[in-house]
Amino acid sequence: MIPDSGNSGFEGAIGGMPLSDVIQLKAYNRFTGVITVEYGKLTGAVYFRNGEIIHAEQGALYGEEAFYQLIKWPGGRFAMENNVAAPNRTIENSVSYLLLEAHRLMDEENGFESTATPSPKAPVAAKPVSIVSRLCQLSGVSSVAMFDASGNVLDSQGSDAEKLSKRGYALAVAARTLGELFGVGNIGSAAFQDSDSQILLFESKRQYLAVSAMQGSPLAQVEADIRAAMTGRK
């Protein structure tokens, strides 16, 4: 086992990057193999196939429950090995969904811990902020909508959230059609602009995230802020 140094952050094959960043990077690179993680005496593993997470394990946990536990660790070390097959498939959701859900669960857990034993004079803690609410608070963002592959809205917020949900789904269908037409498969992210709107679309296997940017806001900066918020970088 590799002893925990007490410092925040993961070290390993790509030193200095948070584990969530490493996972997102390997997803973009369509990695096939395993990332093994050690934190003190605890160990875990995340298995990829062509950039998709298909299995995770940590102690007696496996699947999404194990993945969320690994993301919660404040530090540790990791290593990667190419072309290692998973023992079985326990995860079906996309990388984007898993990271969003992991940070949502951490928000809820932090909120619960802060209100579990309040002092008599302590103020009531605020309700944990969802990822959609968090993105809506970013500079240059007016509305955010999350929906599934059938167009069912999972969460939305902002001045034109209802309109964004419908338009975002239409854009997602168009992007999917273009991906199939040109033989490039799923399109991970795309930007759409016209005379009165700017929309960023993030696609995953089962989830879509549409973000409406304010007119005049630089899309590159808005997108960078969104990716930082989704991966937990400060």
Image: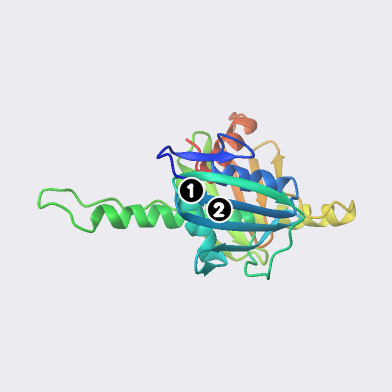
User: Residue type at mark 1?
Assistant: Gly
Q: Who comes first in sequence, dot 2 or dot 1? A: 2
Left or right, 97 with respect to 158, comes to right
* Residue drawn at the location 69% of the way across and 47% of the way down: 26
Q: CA distance from mark 2 to mark 1?
A: 22 Å
Horizontal side of 92 relative to 178 (left or right) equals left
**Relative height, residue 89 to residue 162 (above, below):** below
Residue 57 percent across, percent down from the top left: 56, 63
**Residue 227: horizontal and vertical position, in percent?**
58, 41
The residue nearer to you, when weighing 48 against 169, is 48
Residue sitting farthest toward the left = 120
- Residue 132 percent location from the top left of the image: 49, 51
Q: Residues within 10 Å of mark 2 (few under 14, many from 20)?
A: many
Q: Which residue is mark 2?
A: 99
Tag 1's secondary structure?
A: strand
Look at mark 1 in the image and give the residue it sits on: 158
Q: Amino acid at mark 2?
A: Leu
